[in-house]
Image: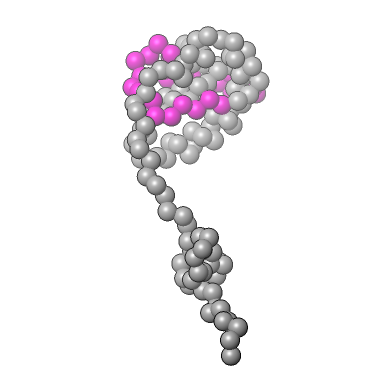
Amino acid sequence: MEIAALIFPGIDQMDFTAPFEVLSRIPGARIHMLWKHLAPVRDIAGLLLTPTATFDSDLPPLDVLVVPGGRGQLPLMDDERVVACPSRPSPPALPRKRRRPFWPPRNSPLPQLSPPGCKPRNAPPRASGRP
């Protein structure tokens, strides 16, 4: 999986490092730190972050693009190079598998819910009103 995170001057490094820590644990994931140039950039508190790729780098098609926040993102809203960055071609999305709704196991202490019109698994038999 190819992942890029945009880093920029004035970034809030927590908005970058928190997703980085999670995404870096995906088996086979490669994370690229992306900026206009390879010179280090300072976050909002002065921490230096070093990009590993530029917008002009020959990156593989990206599966995920992380765009963190911070005060530094405000000037980027009008920066044509930054705004055009996410429009790079990427591979077509894989078809999504239809997910089954979650139903707790029969021995679960959770209440047993059922779809509308279905009898709950652990519901007591209904009284018919007849003796």
Give the farthest residue toward the bottom: 131
The answer to whether one can see residue 15 in this image is yes
Q: Quadrant of residue 113?
A: bottom right
Residue 66 sits above or below residue 34 on the image: below
The answer to whether one can see residue 108 in this image is no
Along the line of sight, which residue is nearer the eye, 114 or 73? Answer: 114
**Residue at the location (42% across, 53% down)?**
100
Residue 108 sits above or below residue 131 on the image: above
The magenta-colored residue range is: 42-68
> In the displayed structure, does residue 116 sit left or right of residue 27?
right
The spot of residue 11 in percent (x, y) is 60, 22
The spot of residue 9 in percent (x, y) is 58, 16
Along the line of sight, which residue is nearer the eye, 59 or 84? Answer: 84
> In the displayed structure, does residue 93 sit left or right of residue 127?
left
The spot of residue 7 in percent (x, y) is 52, 21
Q: Quadrant of residue 46?
A: top right
Along the line of sight, which residue is nearer the eye, 28 or 80? Answer: 80
Decide whether the magenta segment is chiefly helix, strand or loop: loop
The spot of residue 94 in percent (x, y) is 34, 35
**Residue at the location (37% across, 23% down)?**
90
**Residue at the location (56% across, 78% down)?**
126
Q: Quadrant of residue 48?
A: top right
Residue 86 sits above or below residue 30 on the image: above
Residue 83 lies within the magenta run: no
Quadrant position of the C terminus in the picture: bottom right
Residue 67 lies within the magenta run: yes
